[in-house]
Image (tube, grey):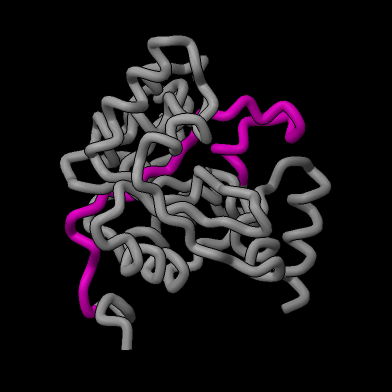
Amino acid sequence: MNKYLHGLKKIDNCTAVILCGGKSQRMGTDKALLKIGGKYLIVSIIEALESIFSEVILVTNHKEKFDGIEKLKGYKMAEDLYPLCGPMGAIYTSLINSSKEFCFVTACDLPIINTDLILKMYEEIQDAQGMVCERGGFIEPLYAFYHQSVTESFKRQMDSGRYRIIEVYKELSIKKHQINEEDFKIFLTNLNTPEDLEAFEKRQAGR
């Protein structure tokens, strides 16, 4: 049995970070404030992550947008230090604001957090600087573990005006957890449009 399952032990050397600063253009409203079944999705994500991590923080473009969500009070929130640099800037901000050796980063618009998948990824890291999911050659940088040792490489690349995260991977030791197409669709497919949200809610209601 996985020693981290069922609340027996949490991952204490890693901060879970929810990235909440996307533009949400296709959704038409801020995805960090989405509700499913009357409940804020971000609250559900926090609850899932807290079952396996001892620290959860939010990285966002504007902290004040969460002022009206009572259940988020008391959680650490950090504003993106490189707001125009895409995922690389958000991950860098996550590492700077974490007190732990690793960060696990995920997006605020993933409706299902699979803790078993996260735990498997963690156990495979060993001495690598990071662990990302890969499906058919596609790498998902925003459902991944990053070690503090990548921080300077990220900053150096952003300061030189290069923001493609796949480029910085070339100078780091990043492992890839292979995920099949079915699991990718279930666990790593974002809610990008109102139609995505409606379809997900219908699937949940039919379960």
Q: Is residue 202 above or below residue 59?
A: below
User: What number of labels is visible?
Assistant: 0
Q: Position of residue 192 (x, y in %)?
A: 72, 41
Q: Is residue 76 visible?
A: yes
> Residue at horizontal 33%, vertical 20%?
155
Q: Position of residue 29 (x, y in %)?
A: 68, 30
> Residue at horizontal 40%, vertical 25%?
63
Residue 194's image quarter?
top right
Q: Which residues are magenta?
A: 8-34
In the picture as drawn, the residue positioned furthest to the bottom comes out as: 1
Which is nearer the eye, 179 or 196?
A: 179
> Residue at horizontal 62%, vertical 31%?
30
Q: Position of residue 72 (x, y in %)?
A: 37, 42
Q: Does the magenta-highlighted stretch encompass residue 114? A: no
> Residue at horizontal 47%, vertical 55%?
45
Horizontal side, residue 167 vs residue 98: left or right: right
Horizontal side, residue 3 vs residue 178: left or right: left
Residue 187's image quarter?
bottom right
Q: Where the N terminus falls, by quadrant?
A: bottom left
Q: Where the C terminus falls, by quadrant?
A: bottom right
Q: Is residue 37 visible?
A: no
In the picture as drawn, the residue positioned furthest to the top comes out as: 160
Which is nearer the eye, 41 or 37?
A: 41
Q: Is residue 203 above or below residue 72?
A: below
Q: Is residue 106 above or below residue 160?
A: below
Horizontal side, residue 26 vs residue 50: left or right: right
Which is nearer the eye, 160 or 5?
A: 160
